[in-house]
Every structure is written in structure tokens, then in C-alpha cells.
Amino acid sequence: MARATGCNPETIRYYEKIGIMPDPPRSTKGYRSYDDTHVRRLKFVMRSRALGFSLEEVRGLLGLVDNRIQTCAEVQAMAEVHLGEVRAKIADLTRIERVLSETVARCTGDAAPDCAIIDALFDA
Amino acid sequence: MARATGCNPETIRYYEKIGIMPDPPRSTKGYRSYDDTHVRRLKFVMRSRALGFSLEEVRGLLGLVDNRIQTCAEVQAMAEVHLGEVRAKIADLTRIERVLSETVARCTGDAAPDCAIIDALFDA
DNA sequence: CCTTGAGCCTGTATCAACTACAGACCCTAG
DNA sequence: CTAGGGTCTGTAGTTGATACAGGCTCAAGG
């Protein structure tokens, strides 16, 4: 399954341990054997993670999936909360980017004993 | 010092433990006593952290400060590396934001048994 | 047939950057 | 004199994995 999905084997076992992935059936020697429902579920998890959902959020999404919900309103609500968080992070980082680039721009980069960046960090 | 800086006391002790802050002198009863060089240094750390520098990066900056560097080129280089990382994170999150908002927009939010978001996560 | 290398198994430790206690001590105000 | 807050040390928890250690199994090559 690691090869099929590109997911690290240890990460798959980790997902199993925390209950994101179900305990799969085992061979007589104890080896896990997966079918494509597992692969499908793992890909769902990986895509959700790639969109920045936390594992707890993924757990919530999977719970909705597993319970064969009748409306998609809950899913939409979760996605919108997450979207808000993503936008907040972008805003934070953009502010940081602005301050940092302004500060770096003030730096001459030469052999001067004073450094504008250090000064800014000390005296901002 | 926690009150003076807004930094959590346990965080200050943590910074001391990992060597970001120096071991301060102690009162006879073992209480730490700080002066304004400590406050100044802690504020430097807090500002650096607020700009997204990791503690290792902060350690590097402080090392340059402590060693009374002759040029600010090194500081500038560190800041530019960090600025690149910040910009990369913004790009990542912007991509996530786009995909997520497109997906959410496709969701009707009504009582339909199919959810566009879940489908997208399964079949993207 | 035997070895070698790869993969799998469990369980534990590690990372960043804190935060949250437990259990003890101390200090000040009412 | 006591009640509350703050401080002290040391340890454990958080998120999302990743990295072993030590052992087992399996397939291919010599």
C-alpha cells in the first residue's frame, strides 16, 4: 500500500494506531493485507492532509463518511472553518513577509558594524 | 520578566534550559532575578519568533549578536533564507486556499446524499 | 541449499516549541 | 494566621510523523 499511495509505511502504521485507518486483516504470518477500500481511504486521508486538514479534522471527515450522512452541510461547515484557518495563516505569513522584506531591504549587507536587521529585532 | 514582556514564565524557563537565555543570578531563596539586559534579549527572541524564525535560527542570530560580528552580511543571509521559506509557505497555503475554496464552492450544502467535497477528496 | 538483502513486525525514542501539571516552597495582604 | 498567588524543579503531554532496535520472513542469486 505504501508503494500504491506513496505514503511512508510507518505513517500507515501510525494512522492505524491512532484509528484513522482500520486494523487490516493479517496473513498467517501477521503481515497486513490491504485491499482497494484501504487504498481509497488512505488516499482520502492523504488528500485531506495535503489540503492542510489536521488529523483530528480528517477523523471528523471520515466519521461523516462512515456514518453515511444524509446532508453534506456538516462537511461544508468543516471545510469552511478550515478554509478560514488557512486564510488566517496566509494573512499572518503575508504580514511577516512584509515586515521581513522591509527589514532586509534596509540592510546594506556590507561590513558596517551596525546591522539594520539586528537593530530592528532589538528595537522594533 | 513575564509581566514585562508578555512571555509565559514557563517559556522563559524553557529558553533558559535550552540555552537561548542565560542562567540569571538567583536570590538567596533561589528565585531568578532579571535585569533589563535579560528583558532586551528576551524581547529580541520574541520578535524573532513572531517573524517566524525557528529557535535554532534565533540561536544563530543571537550567536552573531554575542560575537560582535563585524559585518551584517551573515545576518542578511539568514534573514533572506528565512524570507524564502516564508514565501514558500505562503505559496503553499495559497494553492491550498484555491483548491479548497473551489471545492467548497461546488458544495450545495443541502440535503443531497452526495457531497461534492467528500467526492473531491475521494476522487481528485 | 544457503546466504544476502529487502521488507515486515512491534515497541520505543525523537523532533519543534512549547504547555501543563505535581509537589514543594515562599511571600504578601487581609 | 491563613489564604491566595507566585515561584521552584522535574516530568509528561501536544501534533504528525520519522527513526531506529531487535526480530521474523521471504524471494532471488550463487
Image (cartoon, coloured by chain):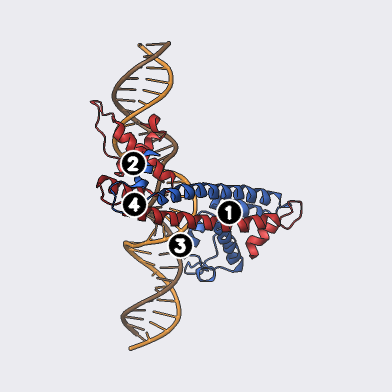
Chain colours: A blue, B red, C brown, D orange
Q: For residue A58, which numbered disc appears in the image? A: 1
> Which residue sits at x=33%, y=34%?
B39
* Eye-nearest disc, 2 or 4: 4
Q: Are marks 2 and 4 in contact (CB under 8 Å)?
A: no
Mark 4 is on which residue type? Val
Which amino acid is tagged 1? Answer: Val
- Side of A5 where B53 appears, left or right: left
Residue type, label 3: Glu
* Amino acid under disc 2: Tyr
B35 sits left or right of A91 in the view: left
Q: How far apart are labels 2 and 4 at the CA level?
A: 21 Å
**Where residue A7 sits: x, y (%)?**
50, 65
Reading the image, the residue beneath label 3 is A10
Q: Residues within 10 Å of mark 3 (few under 14, many from 20)?
A: few
**Residue designated by label 2:** B15
Same chain, marks 3 and 2?
A: no
